[in-house]
Amino acid sequence: MSTLQYIILIPALIFVLMSVASGLIWVERRLLGIWQDRLGPNRVGPFGVLQVLADILKVFTKEDWVPPFADKPVFITAPAIIVVTVLITFAVVPFGPRAGLADLNIGLLFFLAMSSLGVYSVALAGWASDSKYSLLGGLRASAQMISYEVFMGLSLMGVVMLAGSFNLRTIVLAQRHMWNIVPQFLGFIIFMIAGIAETHRLPFDLPEAESELVAGFHSEYSGMKFGMFFLGEYFGITLISAMMTTLFLGGWMGPVLPPIVWFALKTFAFICFFILLRATLPRPRYDQLMSFGWKTMFPLSLVNLLVTGGIILAAR
Amino acid sequence: MLALLRALWLILLHTFKKRVTVQYPEQKPYVPPRWRGRIILSRDPDGGERCVACYLCAVACPVDCIALQAAEDETGRRYPASFRINFSRCIFCGYCEEACPTYAIQLTTDYEMGEYRRANLVYEKEDLLISGQGKYPGYNFYRVAGVEIGGKAKGEAENERPPVDVRGLLP
Ligand code: SF4
Ligand code: SF4
């Protein structure tokens, strides 16, 4: 692609992602409402879609307050980090056979690296806020994300072995005959759980944990800085759903409909599933989360890796 | 694990359940007749003001939001010269209604009293006084009370015997 194309495509992609992320706020509230026998926001505009606009206006006009005891520069950069790291990762996601910004041959590694960088956002936010709740939230976030990252990477190795490449486009093309979710079902489940933990969504929202830590790492944030964390979270959900689609559900592939529509549909289905999880599951205790990660998920992903490797060797 | 999947399925089934939301402005919720809402001052069956300005409601009010000034007309009948309720402080506890000896002050089923300006929530006597009898029809305090006012001497109230002459010898 030429430079000019990039200059047009990048803002377009960012715009689309922004709209998706803010639209998701409405989708999430509506769906949660439906699953709790309520209606959800349905007042502003048709079916309440303009609620998003009202929310954005509200968050922009809120007082943007930095607590006097906070570490100012770090406090201000922290929310930007999460948005930037997640947005950068979208560059390697193949939305269609030709669509997508970068065709990186280590696309998968790039995704893993960027999602690890996201830890800095929460950890620094918790540290810079200089408040006990935020610090506890930040501590939990870093421990949780680092431990879940380990088997998030491991669970994907099966996919890499099947495709023989780290390139996301090649991985999608390798699923022409059979989607990875069939041979790599265990890897899929492990990746999904790790993905939820990475984006610290419910039920793994221990860094936020409204009921115990007020709002965890973003207790001290207000206005658009808080909005950035929110945006980052919704970007994160979209990214994990897009990655699950790419890695396990055959990406853009599907009959009849155009590829980009298939991609969007699959991604949206995963997002809805995430919201359903939120509506259903209670939050585990912190030690339960840790032992679940290290004592169940980690060995399982190792077994998955060994068995996949063994089968591929034997089939050769 | 199975319980988990079952929970997910059950929550998913809630998509088809009946909604419990009452779509408020279009769809009014049921309000019981004894609802404690906007306060009114009622009149007796003869059209006179029931309130006798005894201050009992003002004393009973836990948040002290009733202010009134007593006055007396030429017949000796008491009435409030001014009566003010500050609804921005009222907690709608209904103690004023319980304290009132004349059924004058009553809480009604109206609750839609939102205002943009706080000062508009201060209701004066002309805002409070209604033309009817409210929840308790047919009661007139001066007709049953033994108080003497112009046009009704002692012993002339309903079910009241003529006063006993305490200095007389006969029973
Ligand atoms: S309802 Fe309660 S708070 Fe309101 S005026 Fe009567 S006594 Fe006062
Ligand atoms: S409203 Fe009732 S309690 Fe209050 S001053 Fe009048 S008569 Fe007395």
Image (spheres, helix red, strand yellow):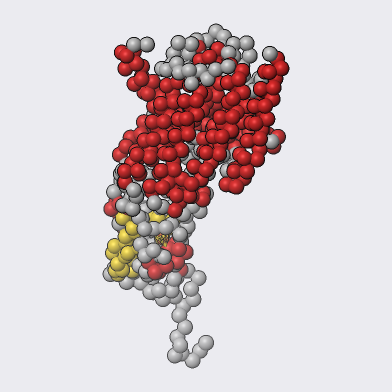
Vertical placement of A216 versus B91: above or below?
Answer: above
Q: Is residue A251 left or right of residue B6?
A: left
Vertical placement of A255 versus A102: above or below?
Answer: above
In percent of width and height, residue A145 lies at 52, 38
Which quadrant holds the N terminus of chain A?
top left
Q: Looking at the image, which residue is at 37% across and 70% down?
A: B54
Vertical placement of A255 versus A200: above or below?
Answer: above
Q: Is residue A311 left or right of residue B60?
A: right
Q: Looking at the image, which residue is at 45% across and 66% down?
A: B99
Q: Nearer the viewer, residue B136 or B99?
A: B99
Q: Is residue A80 left or right of residue A173?
A: left
Q: Looking at the image, which residue is at 38% across and 40% down?
A: A78
Q: Nearer the viewer, residue B154 or A309?
A: A309
**Number of on-image labels:** 0
Q: Nearer the viewer, residue A283 or A248?
A: A248
Q: Nearer the viewer, residue A179 or B66?
A: A179
Which quadrant holds the C terminus of chain A?
top right
Vertical placement of A45 versus B121: above or below?
Answer: above
- Quarter of image, res A122: top left
